Image (cartoon, coloured by chain):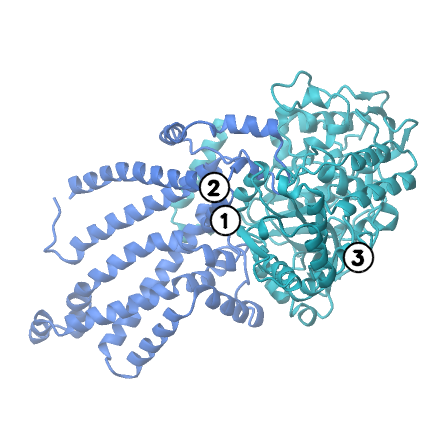
Chain colours: A blue, B cyan
Amino acid sequence: MGRYVVRRLLQVIPVVIGVTFIIFCLVFALPGDPIQALAGDKRADPNIAAILRDHYHLNEPLYQQYWHYISGVFTGDLGETYNGRAISDIVSERFPVTLKLGLTAFAIEAVIGIVAGLFSALRKGKFIDNVVLVSTLVLISIPVFVLGSVLQLEFGVNLKITPVAGIERGWPQSYILPAIVLASTSMAYIARLVRTSMTESIRADYVRTAIAKGLPQRRVIGLHALRNSLIPVVTFLGFDLGALMGGAIITERVFNMPGIGGQLAQSVYLRERPVVVGLVTLLVLIYLVANLVVDLMYAVLDPRIRYE
Amino acid sequence: MRSPRAVKRLAWAACVMAGALAAAACGGGVGSGGSGAVLSSSWGDPQNPLEPANTNEVQGGKVLDMVFRGLKRYDPRTGKAKNMLAQSIETTDSRNFTITVRDGWKFSNGEPVTAKSFVDAWNYGASLRNNQKNAYFFGYIEGYDQVHPETGRQTADTLSGLKVTGPRTFTVRLNQKFSTFPDTLGYAAFDPLPSTFFTDHEGWIAKPVGNGPYRIESYTRGSAMNLRKWDGYPGPDKARNDGVTLLVYTDSNTAYTDVLAGNLDLVDDVPATQLKNVKTDLNGRYINTPAGIIQTLAFPYYDPKWNTPGARKVRTGLSMAINRKQITDTIFRGTRTPATDWTSPVLGADGGYKAGLCGEACTYDPARARQLVREGGGLPGGQVRITYNADTGSHKQWVDAVCNSINNALGNDKACVGNPVGTFADFRNQISQHKMSGPFRAGWQMDYPLIQNFLQPLYYTNASSNDGKWSDKRFDHLVDQANAESDRARAVQLFQQAEGVVRDNMAAIPLWYQNGSAGYTDRLHDVALNPFSVPVYDEIKVG
């Protein structure tokens, strides 16, 4: 187990180098001059532009620029924007917001999704099952920005239960509504996933055996049926954690949260290579760690799976 | 440098460790004020540190306008430059100026504002090594080419044209005659700076100190800036409220919703999608007034096709084929006004704005348009392609509308098409490398409300923003004459004559003037926008 984790962690290094290089090349390939973009509609001062290009190695070939960047990263320096702000500052300022939002959404979708799916499977064809099926269908089909704006208007403007936007009131008040919006689609998928896989395992031989042995129903469902049904759900959740962090651009915008999504969009617009690469690398790391955790969870959920 | 950042990183790491869900305190708690007559207003993080000579966008400009006062200040209503810190600005030859600073002005840290505060600030702003975005504002002062050469290293640290002659007097020598130079001094780049700016730069950047009616109390990047009224402010325009909280919004729709909910007092950019409802939503608490911005179609004169006598007629024909009124009414819903000259209404008649200067050349007349294009030898290449950037500002809509209008007028479905460029950065790149083959989107946001600023940087031979490389000796000569003319009214007249040359050649097709807009809650009174479309915060009354 320990050796497996170490091996997986070592695999992270080539992946990170590869990913940063690909992203670096992609942003490099975008047309447009980042120094000119700083000047807006007016002409960039030629001498200042020349000095900045020199300072940020923009005149050098791609591989040299990448070398400057990656050697900085390994010495703990993520670089700076073309305005001279340290990227580590941007990350430390924006990342906590995205992390709080993402984890809140993650908790909401996991808890509500699993509970709804469970009830739906146990009361198959009954009223509650239909409620879950219809409501998840609705959630899946509404685009995030519509749901966000509608909830914002209803809970923020009309009922005044939650803040309309911003993070001034801190966690949880400012985060709960955006997190629900962000979690909505995945929540619906998880509910349906749990429902399907629970329906299968309830009919499985080992569950029938457990019931025949006279085990209490809670134990049969909780330990035998649910635990075995969770493997696809955990896979989905692991993948979704990364998606929640990186995919919150729309939610962050609607609810005016200064997270990574907005920064990423702005930096792509301004061609700030180091920012884009830094943030994307961070998201990749989250994906990788989440995937590792998922793989380890398999062993916990199903003792037949072993790693060495 | 190294260690504080490391500490910060550690603190951040600790926050993450502590479990993000419980780490509400890590965000930095900014209360939205609320106490007393403090108002909140929508804002965006400034792109650059808040140095006056380094701030060229409206969000940073808002703060500077509250925290600083310069030698002159533009009247929020008329746009006229009036003396603020300047007791007098005297000249006999429109080239050498003697400036006397009023007595009794202080920075909010108690330091008196002297002639040195100005000269040091200007030298800082002009110097190449300080990498200031507004350095070109000092380009008229003698010695600028040594302090900020076009290429290579600087050979001097200070502008030779600036001399402190007394505690409150200094002299300015320009490198050319420029009679309206004093009127440019209301721009933020010319603000004075306290000595702490130079001695403790990092500290000053973290919390700028100025001499305006407000002080900066706190600033949390990405979230909010709290400004409070400075009780010791010596100027005549003391704040009529207790302070302003600027809240960062990434989307103006959200800010607008927050105004409807009463969580935000003032939104100064009403989103286009809400314009339909804004009057009923806010019950008349909506302002829509001209800003110093004009939109035009510029032409590539480096392309021989467009630099012929016939092409001049074609350009005038194209201008007459555009139904400006219809486009501003339907697409912009009245937030643009059809242009009838090459300046902006914010200048006022005294300042050089002349409605109708363009005359029939800007009037929609399809028959005459068709005739002019035919007389001019038809469209160069058989078709005009209007180049624009597709990523911001919904330019596609109006470019398509302009093309439709031209196509209808000329009776040819293929006379005009839009030519989108994917990104703004690439668009500017192509322009600066002279790769345009037809008309392209151009806009000009004034630096200061002077007719000179709408003409010289855009149409003077080889001027900094003359992207189309238009050149006309008569125009250059008239501008030179106007700059040498010490009588203001006469100078404005000469500029207008120069503008007439622009019209006769249709150097660029004027499209429309852009307005600034704002919506506010019923807590606020006396809300107005200045010529730069920044709310006049010091005049707003709360409650």
Q: Which residue is mark 2?
A: A31
Q: Amino acid at mark 2?
A: Pro
Q: Is residue B350 shown left or right of residue B375?
A: right
Numbered mark located on residue B360 in the image = 3
Residue depicted at 33% across the width and 47% down the height: A286
Q: Secondary structure at mark 3?
A: helix
Task: Tell me which corner region of the image, top left, top right, bottom left or bottom right, holds residue A5.
Answer: top left
Q: Which callout, 3 or 2, points to the residue nearer the camera?
A: 3
Q: Which residue is mark 1?
A: B422
How many tags in the picture?
3
Q: Is residue B148 shown left or right of residue A68?
A: right
Mark 3 chain = B
**What is the distance, in whole Å, between disc 1 and disc 2 at their CAs?**
8 Å
Q: Secondary structure at mark 2?
A: loop
Residue depicted at 50% across the width and 40% down the height: A32
Q: Is residue B483 shown left or right of residue B516?
A: right
Q: Amino acid at mark 3?
A: Glu
- Judge by depth and name the residue closer to the eye, A198 or B43: B43
Q: Are marks 1 and 2 on the same chain?
A: no
**What is the distance, in whole Å, between disc 3 and disc 2 at their CAs?**
40 Å
Q: Which callout, 1 or 3, points to the residue nearer the camera?
A: 3
Q: Is residue A183 visible?
A: yes
